[in-house]
Image (cartoon, rainbow, N blue to C red):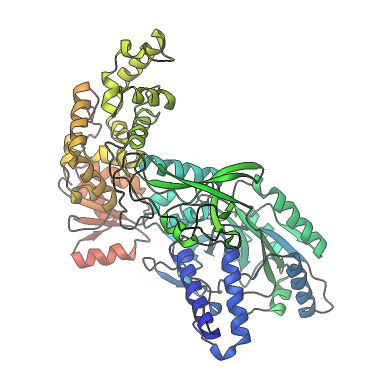
Amino acid sequence: MTIEEKIQHLRKLIDIHNHNYYVLSQPTISDFEYDSLMQELIQLEKDHPEFFDPHSPTHRIGSDIDNTFDQVVHAYPMLSLSNTYTREEISDFIERIRKLLPDQSVEYVCELKYDGVSISLTYEKGRLERAVTRGDGEKGDDVTANVRTIRSIPLVLGGHDYPEHFIIRGEIFLPHEGFERMNRERLETGEPLFANPRNAAAGTLKLQNSSQVAKRPLDCFLYFLLGENLPYNTHYENLMKAREWGFKIPPHLKKCRNLKEISDYIDHWDSQRSKLSFDIDGIVIKVNSYRQQQLAGYTAKSPRWAIAYKFKAEQALTRLISIDYQVGRTGAITPVANLQPVLLAGTTVKRASLHNADQIELMDIRLNDMVYIEKGGEIIPKVVGVDREKRQPDSLPVHYITHCPECGFKLIRREGEAKHFCPNETGCPPQLKGKLEHFVSRKAMDIGLAEATIDQLFKHGLLTDCADFYSLKKDQLIKLERFAAKSAENLINSIEASKNVSWERVLYALGIRYVGETVAKKLAMSFSSIEALSAATAEELTSVEEIGDKIAESLVQYFNNEKNQKLIERLKLAGVRLKDEQNTKTLVSDKLSGKNFVISGTFHEHSRDEIKKLIEQHGGKNLSSVSGNTHYIVAGDDMGPAKRDKARKLGIPIITEDELLGMLRG
């Protein structure tokens, strides 16, 4: 490969990784690997200026722009920071500052480097005016409606000594507890799990429905002020003042005067970062004085007065012995590496995730390879690379399985999804047992059964689907191990009590893919019985708020399955509640009967939920998206431009909150 070919190859590769990271929020390599590629390209271009290209990724910042949002030009460009992984490079940074600012005393501010999504907030007269993502550094996505839902970001500032106009920047992130709760909920609905909190935060910020954003526990630390009339001429003091205005300023800032103090700060947080309730991936070091920042200046990509020291994720090298393929409740196949036991971050690791077939192929993983495993921000360890120098000469590539390891059915791969699936949802043992465990769970039917007991009943042929619970007899149970007369009687009573569980919880308990608690509640409110829901078309389903094409398709497929139809009949005969017998919807009038409404924007007199309730009380129906079935759009402030454009194309009237109230009075 010639030098020119090498440069072109690196540019293309880095562009792909930029797209994966910033647009798809699905990085396929670590930060260290990415930075290594970028440094290699920078050096090659420096050594061979004859191959200069203004479109090279070395001349721009990776973009996270999503064209479904309005674009806003940053008043001050959002530059990236230069990264380093060694103390020597920090020493070099301090020496460069000394040369740029000769004969000046320099104070530094050390901060944690949060692993989230950069955000720029504009405040006018003490009120949040706009929130914009980094984008390409010059312009970003206007995500104001979504950011307004983050409770740690003040909408109105306290005090009175803030500038009339200023910008404050920071990082939106997901704390560990919130991230784990979101993944538990996605597991229950059969959706793919988020890989880490950073991906989850990025994906959440790009949701089109701000009400969905509000349900996710996003948080935000603010760490940089910009403006013409800031209170102080130093970074640290301005942040302390911003804390008084109501901003969530991190408590971990520290002013340092030399390399020793900076190194002590790095050492402390390198050892203590595992105790934090959120992810960090390094330390940021900034010159404190704004005047000195201006004197130090900028490169095309980054400020000369700041640098990021990146922690290397904790890794270990061990041998890959074999690969298991686990089948989940939804049929998703997860490849898991069985490893020679190795100590990593204080625990002995024997197994690690391999994600999916694409990742195995991308890393060219082979049995008996020496593999790198990493914890980083992940819940469980994952395989992140291979030491090819230690590879055995007769090794062969891994051939991903084509059939389910449990039932033998041929695997499928749905469009747009990374994992393979076993389609035998009514006959594959792990799927059947997973559905039984889900059915009895506390938020579903709340039947008092442990996983081990379900496994025992399954093995004895007493349980094959959830309707079988209602056929169990006390004399069958007491013949089994761990069952006495009293425990058998308690189980029968618990099963009998489950017949009174509400319709929405029964719907959730059925374990239909993508139908979690919230979706089940929305569907139960719109369809008062299993008969009405099973007869609904995809178009009727997507007219329900928060029900998209994917959920609608899953529901239609479920109710078209003959085995599922028989299951529902058996549940009905058993006396399980499959309809809303106590419909609490009381109509005030029928003035909006037969009319479908879409709510968009924010309102002054009523909240969005109050407006929706008013519509339903007067016989109308709320839809989640604009379509040919929509009769009116009720528009408030910050109405989405996409909805407005679609309404105009379809000729749908756009009315105000007052006009809606007038319809109710008329």
Q: Residue furthest top?
A: 485
Residue 512 x/y as whole percent: 29, 40
The residue located at (28%, 41%) in the rendering is: 424
Image quadrant where residue 510 sits: top left
Considering depth in this image, is 213 or 149 the residue closer to the camera? 213
Q: Is residue 187 left or right of residue 645?
A: right
Residue 457 seen = yes
Residue 529 seen = no
* Image vertical order of residue 661 relative to residue 511, above or below: below
Residue 14 x/y as whole percent: 51, 72
Q: Is residue 162 left or right of residue 117?
A: right
The residue located at (67%, 43%) in the rendering is: 346
Q: Is residue 579 left or right of residue 166?
A: left
* Image vertical order of residue 191 relative to residue 570, above or below: below
Q: Residue furthest right?
A: 103
Considering depth in this image, is 328 or 77 the residue closer to the camera? 328
Image quadrant where residue 102 sits: bottom right
Considering depth in this image, is 188 or 593 the residue closer to the camera? 188
Image quadrant where residue 165 sits: bottom right
Residue 324 x/y as whole percent: 45, 44
Residue 99 x/y as whole percent: 79, 79
Considering depth in this image, is 504 or 125 the residue closer to the camera? 504
